[in-house]
Image (spheres, helix red, strand yellow):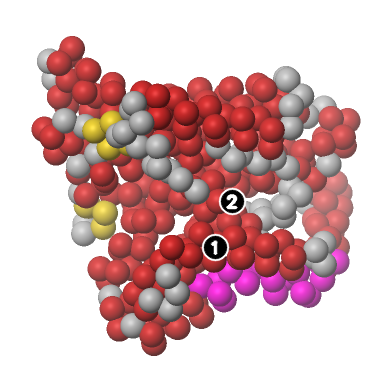
Amino acid sequence: MSQPEAAERAEARTREAAVPLGDRIAAFGPVIGLVLLCAAGAMLNSDFATLDNALNVLTRTAFIGIIAVGMCFVIILGGIDLSVGSMAALIAGCVILFINWAAGAFGSPLMAVIGGAALAVVLGGVFGLLHGILIAKGRIEPFIVTLGTLGIYRAYLTYFADGGALTLDNALADLYAPVYYGSFLGVPIPVWVFPLVALLGALILNRTIFGRHVQAIGSNETVARYAAVDVERVKILTYMLLGLCVGIATLLYVPRLGSASPTTGLLWELEAIAAVIVGGAALKGGHGSITGTVIGAILLSVISNILNLTSLISVYLNAAVQGFVIITVAFLQKGRR
């Protein structure tokens, strides 16, 4: 082993030893919380511990979980995106309009569905790219940019739907349905896609130069600039990555109902941000993990599932529970390094 490598490893061990014991224990908080919640759910309702219910929870988690993977990158970067729910709604509406048109124009319903699925990912990437350019090149705060596009995206969907809903033709809906309702080896398709996206996200975050640059910018943007990191480029790519995740989640979601309305994707941004924060990401950026985000997304879905099965409180208060969770975790983070 060369002297520089030995010095680097010694420094890494020193940093690890310097991490307070409380922070090390807190890192396992989401896992402990998920285990305790599952135990409580099993005791409160016998239906909770069934395989069908577990697959149902994971399927419903997939959409928010995929978006949360992209949101994890943005929050680690030190940014935020409040528009993902509205973005998903507009993408869903555009996909439905395209598929209905393309089925006749192409003369092939299957090609129309495939083209619509591809359009979802492309639109997600384009919207994310737009956010990144406005934030990085325009020097506008992420909160302001995404708050503005939140209203723009949902307004355009409402305009396209004329205040109502956009719906897939019945034959096309049946052709598209297996993307959500189909299964492989007894496991629903969205449940397969979610871990694949999470695994890819973890590899990008932990095993690539881009991932290290995201963490460096979130830790200290000024130092990252002095270290010759192309901050603007990384920001643009990070928001584009989130947009791609929104596109993937939307192409899986569209066949669930076969329609898009002004309420589609409502509060998805709250759920995605909550999943990342509950998973242990630092609100000010610089720290977070895809594994923690996945656990956080599942944990929030388990909470909603338990509330639905037990009727402990009204299901209309699910968003309130998520809001309290975000505030509580943010408060607990105040004392952590």
Tell me: residue 60, above or below residue 258: below
Give the left or right position of residue 239, taking residue 137 as reference: left
Rendered residue at 28%/23% (across/down): 97
Tell me: residue 276, above or below residue 155: below
Residue 313 appears at what percent x and percent y?
A: 45, 74
Could you say which disc has been placed on residue 203 in the image?
Answer: none
- The verdict on residue 82 being magenta is no
Location of residue 100 (image quadrant) = top left
Q: CA distance from mark 2 to mark 1?
A: 14 Å
Outermost residue to the top: 105
Closer to us: 23 or 48: 48
Q: Is residue 143 visible?
A: yes
Residue 287 appears at what percent x and percent y?
A: 71, 52
Q: Is residue 245 visible?
A: no
From the image, tell me which residue sits under label 1: 320
Task: Give whichever of discs 2 and 1 has the lower sequence position.
Answer: 2
Q: 10 Å neighbourhood of mark 2: few (<14), some, or many (≥20)?
A: many
Residue 135 appears at what percent x and percent y?
A: 70, 27
Image quarter (top left, top right, bottom left or bottom right) of the C terminus: bottom right
Give the left or right position of residue 125, taking residue 278 as reference: left
Rendered residue at 13%/34% (across/down): 170
Could you say which disc has been placed on residue 273 in the image?
Answer: 2
Rendered residue at 80%/45% (across/down): 219
Rendered residue at 76%/24% (across/down): 139
Tell me: residue 57, above or below residue 260: below
Closer to us: 308 or 219: 308
Amino acid under disc 2: Ile
Region rendered in magenta: 18-34
Local SS, label 1: helix
Amino acid under disc 1: Ala
Give the left or right position of residue 226, taking residue 297 as reference: right
